[in-house]
Structure formats: C-alpha cells, structure tokens
Image (cartoon, rainbow, N blue to C red):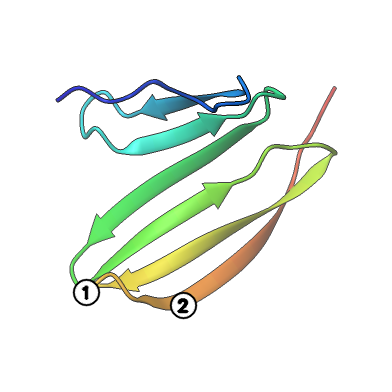
Amino acid sequence: MLQPTDVILASGRQYQLHFDDVTGALTGVTTPSLAHHQFTRIASLGVDRVIYLPPSSSRSTAAYTQYRDSAGRIVQVETHRIFLCIK
C-alpha cells in the first residue's frame, strides 16, 4: 500500500510522515521546525493503546497513552512524565 510521505501546505511548509514498514501505521510526524512527534499503537483483546511522545524541548517531556475500546472510543487517558538523561 502506498502511503504519503510528505504534506506540503499552500504556504510551502512541509510535514514529513513516517510509517511502520510492516503494519503501515503512522509512527511519526516531523514538522517544518524539525520537531518529531512519535506514535505507537498496541492492539490487544478489547482495547487498543495509542502512545504519543511529543518532541523533547528540555530534559523532561510529557507523553500520554490513550486507551480505546473496540468501537474506537477513548475510555482512558494517562499522562506520563519522561526524564531524559543527556550526558
């Protein structure tokens, strides 16, 4: 299946789309400022989890996990604080 790799707005700003080679799922978006947003989907019986990791602009960042039921409705959202070790 062919996936778009770039979205170019009328203003000329370009967004790069990144997909999983196996599943074809969207795994990331790179913005014109080169900030990279990451997505992971974990499917299990009766519930799907979508994990979002925003670009890191400091030593810590807030990620979140959405839990969705089999109809795609959000049933729970958890936020996570991630601390980065930079040497």
Spot occupied by residue 55 in the image (x, y as percentages of width and height): 68, 37
| Residue at which label 2 appears | 76
- Give the residue displayed 21% in from the left and 74% down from the top: 71
State the residue in front, 4 or 83.
4
Label of residue 71 in the image: 1
Q: Place residue 53 in its image quadrant.
A: top right
State the residue in front, 33 or 75.
33
Q: Is residue 66 left or right of residue 49?
A: right
Q: What amino acid is labelled 2 in the image?
A: Gln
Question: Mark 2 against mark 1, which lies toward the viewer?
Answer: 1
Mark 1 Cα-neighbour bin, 10 Å: few <14, some 14–19, many ≥20: few
List the single residue furthest toward the front.
10
Q: Is residue 13 above or below residue 48?
A: above
Q: Is residue 66 above or below residue 12?
A: below
Q: Is residue 58 left or right of residue 71?
A: right
- Give the residue displayed 75% in from the left and 48% down from the top: 61
List the single residue furthest toward the left.
1
Mark pair 2, 1: CA separation? 14 Å
Between discs 2 and 1, the one toward the N terminus:
1
Spot occupied by residue 3 in the image (x, y as percentages of width and height): 27, 25
- Give the residue displayed 85% in from the left and 38% down from the top: 58
Spot occupied by residue 1 in the image (x, y as percentages of width and height): 14, 25
